[in-house]
Image (cartoon, grey):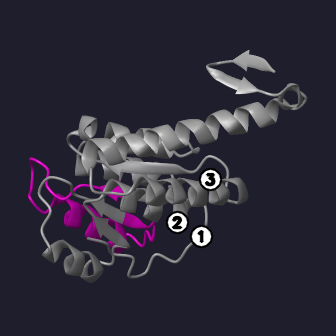
Amino acid sequence: MAFRSGQLFAPADFKNEENYIEMQRMRYAAIASLAIVKKRDANISVPSMVKSVEVAMNLAKEGSDNPWVLWVDDKPNNNIYEREALSSIGVSFILAETTEYALEVLEDRKFAAIISDMDRPDSNRAGYILLDTIRERGDTTPLFFYARGGWKPQYQLETLKHRGQGCTNDGQKLFEMITGTVFGGVSTNNRLAA
């Protein structure tokens, strides 16, 4: 056996470098995803999170390559673990700290999904303003709200009213909704989660 990057591998693992890369990618996805669990919510079960990562990895293998997600949040450092978990399985991000910048970016490129917070300094309904504006433009990009700190139950109903696809304050649920959408082409209608 050979020693590589902190892990033991059999000689057969080196016959195909893709095996090593895939093993590392899965390892980092699991680590990053479990970091969300540990950091955000100690009540989430590790087996449940591992299952989410396994499903996401399988979807990533079968789905589109290198999907891009626009993440709109005036405090992007609050979502580092979540982005790392999604990045580890191939999701790339463009970050926008304002609704205005997000709308500019959306004029120039397409995304597999959009994640937005609810409140920003310009408005406590900035997420809905963003969603309404892009829908008025005819943009049907799936949009998910992720509001950890200021979560309110009425966000779920309002998300549907404004034609959004999902709403959660749970990192694992966000991971599942985004990976199901960008890799699996999963229908996101009524995929709201508490």
Q: In this view, does 41 lie to the left or right of 113?
A: left
Q: Is residue 134 left or right of residue 66?
A: left
Q: Is residue 188 left or right of residue 169?
A: right
Q: Quadrant of residue 58?
A: bottom right
The quarter of the picture where the C terminus appears is bottom left
Q: Which of marks 2 and 3 is nearer the N terminus?
A: 3
- Badge 1 amino acid: Gly
Q: Residue 185 carries which label?
A: 1
Q: Which of marks 1 and 3 is nearer the N terminus?
A: 3
Q: Mark 2 points at which residue?
A: 181
Frontmost residue, 35 versus 116: 35
In space, the residues marked 2 and 1 are separated at their CA atoms by: 5 Å
Q: Mark 3 points at which residue?
A: 57
User: In the rendered structure, does residue 138 fall within the stretch colored magenta?
Assistant: yes
Residue 73 coordinates in the image, percent (x, y): 25, 46
Crowd band around label 2 with a 10 angstrom C-alpha radius: few (<14), some (14–19), many (20+):
some
| Residue 58 against residue 78 in the figure, above or below | below
Crowd band around label 1 with a 10 angstrom C-alpha radius: few (<14), some (14–19), many (20+):
few
